[in-house]
């Protein structure tokens, strides 16, 4: 008997038995007196580990309201530690800005410019590429395949290290690029000094991003928070030692951030060692890290994920550039800095919720529980809407006092106060749509998210911003009204996609993604594929003609 597995779309409408499992077909050419048997994986027996539910049917609670509360508790228990981690890392960037400000206006301007350049060309790219492993890890954990998580971790680390090479070369040329673009040579030199000593961060983030996703996909979040708290608690003393005490200046601030990330990576590796989670990660005799099919699967998810994240990150940097050509560029750029810091702080909450929803949806789809994935989506979107209302009320209530925390300039305070209500309206759409992005990540549909971001931010938001700011005369407020249009469009498209989702099909796609040997199945687009086994049996006692 000869058995040949193949992955083909399940498009046949005839020649199938009622149970959908075994099908007979006419003999193939050259195989007379043979029998062709096709077995479709989603119709396998109840004993198949692909399809075994996490709980017996009798243990599933029949009361939807109770199940909703249970799901909300699960989501919040995941989200709360992620929120704390985000706030801790946010405080780290504020400490760095504080020490840059103590060095003077030139180091502050150069360091801020370097951080923006690093975000656009490096950090956003690494973060986006790492996100591609998220659906593989969450669905593999739900399917009970820990070795697939480990393989995805190793591949992603290698992918990020490879991407760091061209990014490093770009950073080394940063000074010439900035001067060519018209930046002041002194500011360009200060920015180059900062980013030169930030180069080791690329290596550390190539480890840190995959480690965080690897743990979070298994609902392990408290160790991440504890490690972040320990690392950030040393960030201020390290800055104080390197900058005022040793007098390293701008390089000292950059090195302090590198050392903090190093401490965080070492603490996470120590946790992996103590908890025993390092065992699946260690290469074994059946190593398939370099499997071509596995790399195709990872890249088919990582590249659209990177595009989706970069498109949104780059939008805010483009807005800063547009502020520089408005009527009062100094005040508008400063006000934009305050507002971006504000929206970055608010973004921690929906981003953490989206990460939790991605974990829950991916785990349930991997366990072949489409109804539970749908419930996690509904509860997550409801929580996202509540976050949006809270963010709007916060932005509206602090509009007259918020900018005073950062500056005493009356013009900057007035500009910020006039735009904060618009920012709050943006968050009404941003919070639920960020949660929706988590749903698409958990269901391995990053290409859909990238298309939505491209159309919303650059097809709608950018033209509206330019039109209102430069042609209608709304100036600074026009830029933010354009962002409001972008967020509203993004929300409508995201909710439409989620509403039309066939959760049964997404569960079948998850079985394919986690069943292809190391995450080797390539999930192509929304439709996906059905894994099919084909075997040709030579009928006994038959003579070939």
Image: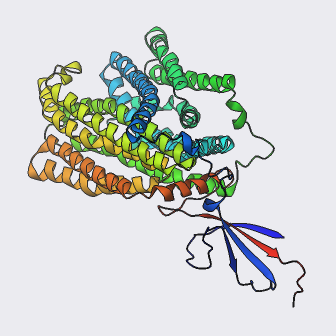
- Identity of the residue drawn at 44% across and 50% down: 440
- Identity of the residue drawn at 90% across and 86% down: 543
For residue 262, side relative to residue 435 (left or right):
right
- The x and y percentages for residue 539 are 84, 78
Q: Residue furthest left?
A: 473
Residue 313 visible within the image: no
Image quadrant occupied by the C terminus:
bottom right
Q: Quadrant of residue 460?
A: bottom left
Image quadrant occupied by the N terminus:
bottom right
Q: Is residue 5 above or below residue 158?
A: below
Q: Is residue 204 above or below residue 18?
A: above
Q: Residue furthest bottom?
A: 545
In this view, the residue in front, 11 or 170, is 11
- The x and y percentages for residue 247 are 46, 13
- The x and y percentages for residue 451 are 38, 57
In this view, the residue in front, 332 or 534, is 534
- The x and y percentages for residue 14 are 58, 79
Q: Quadrant of residue 6?
A: bottom right
Q: Is residue 61 above or below residue 416?
A: below
For residue 208, side relative to residue 25 (left or right):
left
Residue 499 visible within the image: yes
For residue 407, side relative to residue 524 (left or right):
left
């Amino acid at each position: 008997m000869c058995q040949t597995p193949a992955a083909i779309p399940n498009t046949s409408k005839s020649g199938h038995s009622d149970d959908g499992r075994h099908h007979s077909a006419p003999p193939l050419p050259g195989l007379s007196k043979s029998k062709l048997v096709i077995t479709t994986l989603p119709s396998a027996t109840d004993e198949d580990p692909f399809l075994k539910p996490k709980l017996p049917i009798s243990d599933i609670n029949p009361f939807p309201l109770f199940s909703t509360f249970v799901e909300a508790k699960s989501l919040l228990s995941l989200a709360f530690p992620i929120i704390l981690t985000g706030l801790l890392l946010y405080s780290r960037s504020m400490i760095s800005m504080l020490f840059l400000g103590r060095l003077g206006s030139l180091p502050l301007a150069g360091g801020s410019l370097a951080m923006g350049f690093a975000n656009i060309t490096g950090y956003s790219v690494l973060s986006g590429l790492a996100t591609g492993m998220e659906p593989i890890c969450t669905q593999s954990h739900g399917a009970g395949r820990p070795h697939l998580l480990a393989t995805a971790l190793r591949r992603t680390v290698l992918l990020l290290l490879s991407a760091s090479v061209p990014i490093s070369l770009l950073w080394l040329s940063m000074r010439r690029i900035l001067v060519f673009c018209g930046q002041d040579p002194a500011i360009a030199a200060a920015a180059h000094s900062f980013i030169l000593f930030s180069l080791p961060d690329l290596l550390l983030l190539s480890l840190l991003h995959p480690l965080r996703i690897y743990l979070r996909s298994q609902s392990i979040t408290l160790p991440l928070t504890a490690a972040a708290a320990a690392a950030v608690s040393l960030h201020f003393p390290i800055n104080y030692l390197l900058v005022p005490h040793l007098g390293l200046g701008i390089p000292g601030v950059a090195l302090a951030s590198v050392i903090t990330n190093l401490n965080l990576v070492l603490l996470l590796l120590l946790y992996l060692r103590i908890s025993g989670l390092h065992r699946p990660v260690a290469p074994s005799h059946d190593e398939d890290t370099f499997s071509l099919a596995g790399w195709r699967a990872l890249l088919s998810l990582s590249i659209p994920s990177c595009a989706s994240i970069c498109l949104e990150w780059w939008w805010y940097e483009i807005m800063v550039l547009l502020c520089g050509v408005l009527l009062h560029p100094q005040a508008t750029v400063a006000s934009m800095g305050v507002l971006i810091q504000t929206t970055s702080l608010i973004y921690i909450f929906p981003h953490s919720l989206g990460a939790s929803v991605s974990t829950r949806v991916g785990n349930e789809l991997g366990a072949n529980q489409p109804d539970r994935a749908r419930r996690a989506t509904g509860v997550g979107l409801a929580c996202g809407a509540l976050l949006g209302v809270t963010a709007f009320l916060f932005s509206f209530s602090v509009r007259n006092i918020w900018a005073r925390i950062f500056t005493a300039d009356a013009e900057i305070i007035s500009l910020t106060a006039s735009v904060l209500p618009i920012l709050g309206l943006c968050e009404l759409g941003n919070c639920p749509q960020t949660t929706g992005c988590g749903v698409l990540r958990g269901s391995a549909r990053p290409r859909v998210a990238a298309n939505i971001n491209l159309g919303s931010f650059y097809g709608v938001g950018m033209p509206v911003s330019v039109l209102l700011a430069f042609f209608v005369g709304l100036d600074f407020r026009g830029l933010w009204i354009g962002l409001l249009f972008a967020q509203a469009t993004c929300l409508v498209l995201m909710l439409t996609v989620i509403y039309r989702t066939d959760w049964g099909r997404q569960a079948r796609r998850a079985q394919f993604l986690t069943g292809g040997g190391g995450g080797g199945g390539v999930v192509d687009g929304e439709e996906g594929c059905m894994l099919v086994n084909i075997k040709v049996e030579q009928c006994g006692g038959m003579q070939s003609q």
